[in-house]
Amino acid sequence: MNNREKYKRAFSVLHASQETDWEAIMKTSREHNMRKTGTKLLLAAVLVSLLAITASAAGVRLMQGWGGNMEVLSVEGGMEVHVHTDNLTEPVEIRDGRMWFVVNGENRDITDEISQTEAFTYTFMDEQGITHYWVLGLNGEELENYGYAEYLKSDTWQGGYSARVNDNPDGTTDAVWLERWKQENNCPW
């Protein structure tokens, strides 16, 4: 008898039980995974809350940009701006050859309010009393060639960022619409 026949003979007596409820086993496994995921989410929420409490106790103020695009940490003596460039939430959608502004659930056609020299501006105040300024303009003839910026202001400018504009070494951009808006609004960046 060769090895193959020996293995076949040895394992021929093994059979899965007819009473095994594979659906119940899979359901239990899914429920276990869901509990693990829920526990991880709860722990993450607790950690974020503790960090916020710690930051508050240390005199740090955290301000959030719209769509999770940035955080501004304001501490005595300075500010830190963290922009999530790897996954920015776009403030507009291009539909049927028109540009629609979508921040805060808006669904506003701004096609005729935006150009290479004139910016479209939208403001809102968040629950912390911080005013968000959204500034959008065109960097070329096509609607798809747009840029945008979000700046935060309380009594003074707190922080901000611009996206889809060409930055120059002197801190300016090639976006005429944005440079004009910053000058008109005394925005330091």
Image: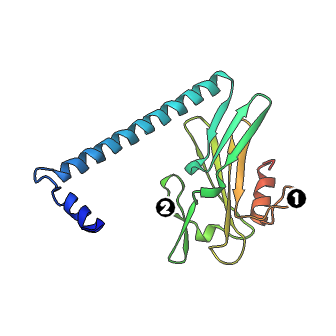
- The answer to whether residue 153 shows anywhere in this view is yes
Q: Is residue 157 visible?
A: no
| Mark toward the start of the polypeptide (2 vs 1) | 2
Label 2 amino acid? Asn
- Local secondary structure at mark 1: loop
Residue at 72 percent of width and 65 percent of height: 118
Element type where label 2 sits in the image? loop
Q: Are marks 2 and 1 in contact (CB under 8 Å)?
A: no
Q: Which residue is drawn at the image coordinates 66% and 31% (left, top)?
A: 61
Image: 72 above or below 54: below
Q: Residue furthest top?
A: 57
Which residue is rendered at x = 21% and y = 58% of the image? 10
Task: Identify residue type, mark 1.
Answer: Pro
Q: Is residue 31 left or right of residue 74?
A: left
Distance from disc 2 to disc 1, alpha carbons, whole Å, reads 36 Å
Q: Mark 2 sits on what residue?
A: 107
Residue 131 percent across, percent down from the top left? 63, 42
Query: What's the mark number on residue 169?
Result: 1
The image quadrant of residue 86 is bottom right
Give the side of residue 172 with respect to residue 148, left or right: right
Out of 92 and 177, give the one closest to the viewer.
Answer: 92
Single out the residue that lies furthest toward the right. 170
Density class for disc 2 (Cα within 10 Å; few <14, some 14-19, many ≥20) is: few
